[in-house]
Structures are given as structure tokens and as C-alpha cells.
């Protein structure tokens, strides 16, 4: 199978069950909403090293936010409910509450919830107060600049993490341009984020290592510099590989993001699109690349 | 399911206690069973059919017509359904209601929504005294739900209120939110004298200024833009209330009190000068 002359390898991406949530962060203007969103989703590329995976989903115009101010929706993904509450408490407490003029709302209507505002409220030292309207409870926490407003509970749902594809290019420049185009297209899909810097990963990993203290190490089969030293997965002419990892609130959203991303990445200078997997032994989801167009 | 229409046959002067006028009581009854429901007329027990014409079988949607100023306790303790009233209504409308909706195209007398726990009570006219208040001897007034009044409301609205929201588009009488425990009162017109007397917690929002200042037991805190009010006012606009963008983005002066009690209540007064600038 080829798209724009680029080969789509007959392989699959292996993805995992996760828990996901959406936060809506608002502020006095879009710059401060963006600042808070970046702070709270920073250093959240991998659950292994960061405790969670997170990213900015999209900007929200004032008419789409609960308080009518400019906003940003961000998505968080973790491996357990308990971890979700822990991560949100840390990240909202340090990344949003500290940021001038912000407020933070649950952006997901779900049956399951984690308690965030209900615990952050104690920062108010007894002067916090709640407002409840139509079953929704908001906490007002006094801060030096006014009040920090936050939902008591945030909806969470089962989600999918680790959707991915690899872009095999003739050069770093062509691979990066294709990856940037892919990420731009994928950001138009609702319910997904690409948690790595700029949405792109260069240090893809394989399971295991020759060192006993490491559970994962560099993906040697896709490192062009190791072509002569290991069993390489790279066809002749490939000199750079970049990976795009995508997490989504649903499997359909992940599939759609992969589809539009791959289509955008298939351009001049790209030789093949592949995907990362563990032989189907680890992940609960297998997403064959060629089935994305069926 | 079509609505059950209940129409007063002739004008009355004696008080009628009509808590049977409720979707909870009507649901599932045939027309003749609805007409046989008991009501207290003065000191005599009658049936609903003695005073009212009933059209249709009982349903969770009731339409009331006629001069109902002497008919009390309509929708009392109701938990579901809807009552549409075309005309003025007597005391205790929707008292202790837990759910459903009551829409009144007219005025309501005292104690409307008293000790209400849930649901929506919307009055397109004026409301009498003790709106959403606590009955004498009770420790808590309104404890949930929403009351919207398009006109004015009388004194002591939200007395001992514990939770919920009262919104008055017109002016609000004296002693609004007296001994309030929590909850929110929003008034678009002027806020009457001695508002929040003895309040522990809760919020009173004055969008149209004050009739007679505030009690000296309220202390000035600051001028700021409460984010939660943006959320509330946008919801009120969704209910058709005349919220302006200037009010949503506006500056409010915060006063806290009543310091004769816990002192964690607040009165937020909209800064109209700030709006003008």
C-alpha cells in the first residue's frame, strides 16, 4: 500500500488501556491560559518517567468556556484512577493555581470522577468556599490576586495511549517536515494529544536493555547510525526516523488522528511509514496501519 | 403525555389548602380520580372536582387556570413533573419541593419555595415575603434548587437559606438573606435594607445597587472580578435573564459579614462606575 508514493508498511501500532481526562483552563486572556496549560502539561511525555502523559488539545474561544473567558483544553492520561488524582492534584496545584487569573474546570462528562478541587480547597486555610449550581460544585480558594476557581470533581474515562507511527525519511530535514505536518493535521482531531515535545519523538524505545537496571532502551533497529552493527529495520536510503505518539479519549479518536497524520506525513523525501509494537504481547489494542483507510 | 388542565370554576374568597395539586399526586390517575383528590376549603374537606374543572387524565404536567390567589400549597413537596400556572397564586407555592418545575405567569404570595430542596420555581410576576425562607422554628430555609423571579420580591427572601439560588430581576425587599447559612441570592434591581443580617456564609449579589447601604457589621474587602460570578451570570443569561457582558466582566466590591456571627458571608456590589468607564 502506498500513499503519495510512500510505502505504508504492513504492521500495526500497539496501544494500551489508560485513564483519560480533559481539563479546561481559563484566564483573563489567551496568553495566560496558554501559559498555565503549558506549565501543567510540561514534563508529561511518558508515564514511565513523568507519571502521566499530557498535552494541549486545543484553544477554546470564550463562548465555549464555563466562565466566558479565553481557555485551553488539555488532556491527561495515566495508568490508574489513583494516579490520575495524584497527578492532577500536583499539576493543577502547581501549574494552574499558581498562574495569575486562572480557573480550572472539568471538561469531561463521565460516570467516574476524581476529587481535585475538593482536596486543593484546603489551601484556602478555612476561608475557601464552595458554590453549587445544578449539581456542579465549584470551590473558590482565596489567593493573593483574588480567587482561584476550580471544579470539585473531574470526570475521567477509560482511554487509549500509545498509538503511534514512524516516519522514515531520507534526511532529518525531510523527516522533521513530514512529522510537523502530521502533528499539525492531528491537532485538528478532537480528543487526542501528542504528549512529546512538539508532538514528535526522536528517541523511540524498545523493551529491555543489556543493562539489568533498565527496562527500556533505544530502539536500535531504527537507529540509522547502527545500521551496520545491529539487525536494522531501515530500508536503504533512510537516514532519519521520527515517531509520533498519540493518546486519545477513545480508540476511534486515536485511529482518526493516525490516519490524518500519516496522510499528511506522506510527502516527498519520506520512504516508508511504519509503527512501533511489541509483537502484540503488551498492549491491549492493535491498530494495523493499512486498516486505517478501510 | 398531554397536560392535565385544572381550572377554577368560580372565584373564591375562603382559603383553599391544595397540596394535592401536585404532579406526584396526579401521575397515573384517571380524570375522575384526580377530581376526587381532597382539598381543604376553609374548614371543610372537599374534593378537587368541587372547586375545579379537570380536563384529561392525571399526568406529570399540570396546567392551572383561574384566580388562585386564595389557593395555597400548590406543588408542595412535589418531586417531579411540571406545573404551569396562568394567574396569581396564593401562599406556600412549591414549598418544600424537591424536584420538577413550577412556572407562574402571574404573581405569587408569601412563602413561595419555602424550604425548597430542589427543582426550579420560576415566577414571571412579583413574589411576596419569605421567598425561599424557613418556617418559624425551622433551622434551615431553602436547601437546594433554583428560584427565578422576574419582578420584585418581598422582605426576608432566603431567610436561613442553606443552599440553592434565588434570582430576582426586580428589586428585593429588606432583610434579604437574613441568617443565611449558605447559598446564593442575586438581585438585578436594588438590594433592600439590612441585607444579610446575621448571615454566616453564602453570597448576596447586588447588580442594581443598594436601597439603604449595608449594615455596619459588614466589612469592606476589595474590588475584584469574581470568576465564579462569570460562571453564574452566564447560566442566568441561559435562563433568559438580562445579563449584560459588562456585568459578566465587571468589577464587584466585596463586603464580608455578618461579624456578629461567623462572618464568612459576602455581599458583592456591582461597581456601576467601573461599568461606565
Image: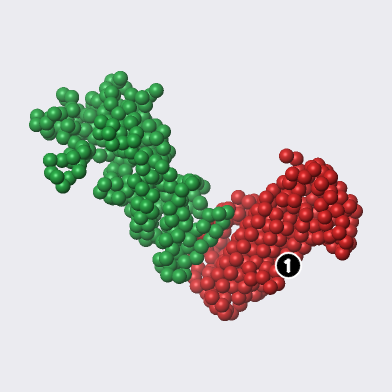
What residue do we see at 69% from left, 48% from top? B81
Q: Total marks drawn?
A: 1
Residue at mark 1: chain: B
Image: B267 above or below A215:
below
Q: Is residue A77 rendered to the left or right of residue B78?
A: left
Whether residue B105 is visible, yes or no, is: no
What residue do we see at 61% from left, 59% from top? B144
The x and y percentages for residue A181 are 32, 33
Q: Nearer the viewer, residue B120 or A199?
A: B120
Q: Colour of chain A?
A: green
Q: Is residue A251 rendered to the left or right of residue B143?
A: left
Secondary-structure class at tag 1:
loop
Residue tagged 1: B129
- Would you call the spot at circle 1 few (<14 residues within 10 Å), some (14-19), or many (20 or more)? many
Q: Quadrant of the N terminus of chain B?
A: top right
What residue do we see at 30% from left, 33% from top? A14
The x and y percentages for residue A188 are 40, 36
Identify the residue at the far right of this view.
B10
The x and y percentages for residue B248 are 55, 57
In the figure, the red chain has which letter? B
Image: A257 above or below B243:
above
Whether residue A205 is visible, yes or no, is: yes
The x and y percentages for residue B136 are 70, 72
Q: Nearer the viewer, residue B129 or B1?
A: B1
What residue do we see at 67% from left, 72% from top? B175
Q: Is residue B201 rendered to the left or right of residue A54?
A: right
Amino acid at each position: 500500500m502506498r500513499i503519495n508514493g510512500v510505502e505504508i508498511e504492513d504492521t500495526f501500532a500497539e496501544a494500551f488501556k489508560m485513564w483519560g481526562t480533559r481539563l479546561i483552563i481559563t484566564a483573563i486572556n489567551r496568553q495566560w491560559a496558554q501559559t498555565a496549560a503549558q506549565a501543567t502539561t510540561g514534563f508529561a511525555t511518558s508515564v514511565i518517567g513523568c507519571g502521566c502523559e499530557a498535552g494541549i488539545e486545543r484553544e477554546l474561544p470564550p463562548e465555549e468556556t464555563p466562565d466566558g473567558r479565553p481557555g485551553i483544553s488539555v488532556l491527561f492520561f495515566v495508568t490508574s484512577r489513583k494516579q490520575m488524582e495524584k497527578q492532577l492534584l500536583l499539576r493543577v496545584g502547581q501549574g494552574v493555581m499558581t498562574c495569575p487569573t486562572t480557573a480550572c474546570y472539568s471538561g469531561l462528562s463521565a460516570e467516574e470522577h476524581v476529587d481535585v478541587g475538593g482536596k486543593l480547597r484546603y489551601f484556602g486555610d478555612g476561608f475557601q468556599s464552595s458554590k453549587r449550581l445544578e449539581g456542579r460544585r465549584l470551590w473558590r480558594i482565596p489567593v493573593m490576586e483574588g480567587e482561584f476557581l476550580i471544579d470539585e470533581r473531574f470526570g475521567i474515562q477509560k482511554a487509549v495511549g500509545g498509538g503511534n507511527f514512524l516516519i522514515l525519511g531520507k534526511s532529518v530535514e525531510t523527516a522533521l517536515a513530514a512529522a510537523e505536518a502530521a502533528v499539525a493535521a492531528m491537532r485538528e482531531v478532537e480528543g487526542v494529544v501528542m504528549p512529546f515535545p512538539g508532538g514528535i519523538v526522536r528517541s523511540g524505545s524498545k523493551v529491555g536493555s543489556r543493562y539489568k537496571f533498565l527496562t527500556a532502551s533505544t530502539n536500535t533497529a531504527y537507529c540509522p547510525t547502527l545500521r551496520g552493527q545491529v539487525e536494522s529495520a531501515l530500508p536503504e536510503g533512510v537516514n532519519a526516523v521520527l515517531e509520533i505518539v498519540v493518546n486519545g479519549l477513545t480508540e476511534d479518536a486515536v485511529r482518526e488522528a493516525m490516519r490524518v497524520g500519516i496522510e499528511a506525513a506522506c510527502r516527498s523525501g519520506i520512504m516508508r511509514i511504519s509503527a512501533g509494537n511489541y509483537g502484540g504481547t503488551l498492549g491491549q489494542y492493535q491498530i494495523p496501519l493499512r486498516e486505517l483507510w478501510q | 403525555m398531554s397536560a392535565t388542565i385544572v381550572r377554577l370554576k368560580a372565584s373564591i374568597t375562603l382559603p383553599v389548602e391544595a397540596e394535592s395539586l401536585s404532579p406526584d399526586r396526579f401521575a397515573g390517575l384517571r380524570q375522575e380520580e384526580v377530581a376526587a383528590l381532597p382539598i381543604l376549603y376553609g374548614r371543610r374537606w372537599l374534593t378537587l372536582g368541587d372547586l375545579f374543572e379537570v380536563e384529561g387524565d392525571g399526568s406529570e404536567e399540570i396546567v392551572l387556570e383561574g384566580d388562585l390567589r386564595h389557593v395555597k400549597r400548590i406543588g408542595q413537596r412535589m418531586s417531579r413533573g411540571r406545573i404551569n400556572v396562568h394567574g396569581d397564586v396564593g401562599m406556600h407555592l412549591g414549598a418544600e419541593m424537591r424536584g420538577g418545575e413550577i412556572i407562574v405567569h402571574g404573581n405569587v404570595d408569601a412563602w413561595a419555595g419555602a424550604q425548597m430542596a430542589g427543582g426550579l420555581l420560576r415566577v414571571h410576576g412579583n413574589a411576596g415575603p419569605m421567598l425561599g425562607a424557613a418556617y418559624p422554628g425551622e433551622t434551615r430555609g431553602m436547601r437546594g434548587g433554583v428560584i427565578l423571579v422576574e419582578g420584585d420580591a418581598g422582605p426576608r427572601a432566603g431567610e436561613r437559606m442553606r443552599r440553592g439560588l434565588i434570582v430576582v430581576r426586580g428589586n428585593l425587599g429588606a432583610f434579604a438573606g437574613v441568617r443565611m447559612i449558605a447559598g446564593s441570592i442575586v438581585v438585578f434591581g436594588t438590594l433592600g435594607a439590612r441585607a444579610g443580617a446575621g448571615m454566616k456564609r453564602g453570597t448576596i449579589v447586588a447588580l442594581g445597587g443598594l436601597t439603604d447601604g449595608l449594615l455596619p457589621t459588614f466589612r469592606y474587602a476589595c474590588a475584584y472580578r469574581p470568576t465564579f460570578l462569570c460562571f453564574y451570570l452566564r447560566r442566568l443569561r441561559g435562563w433568559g435573564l438580562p445579563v449584560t457582558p459588562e456585568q459578566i466582566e465587571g468589577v464587584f466590591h466585596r463586603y464580608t459579614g455578618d461579624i456578629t456571627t461567623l462572618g464568612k458571608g459576602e455581599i458583592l456590589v456591582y461597581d456601576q462606575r467601573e461599568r461606565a468607564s
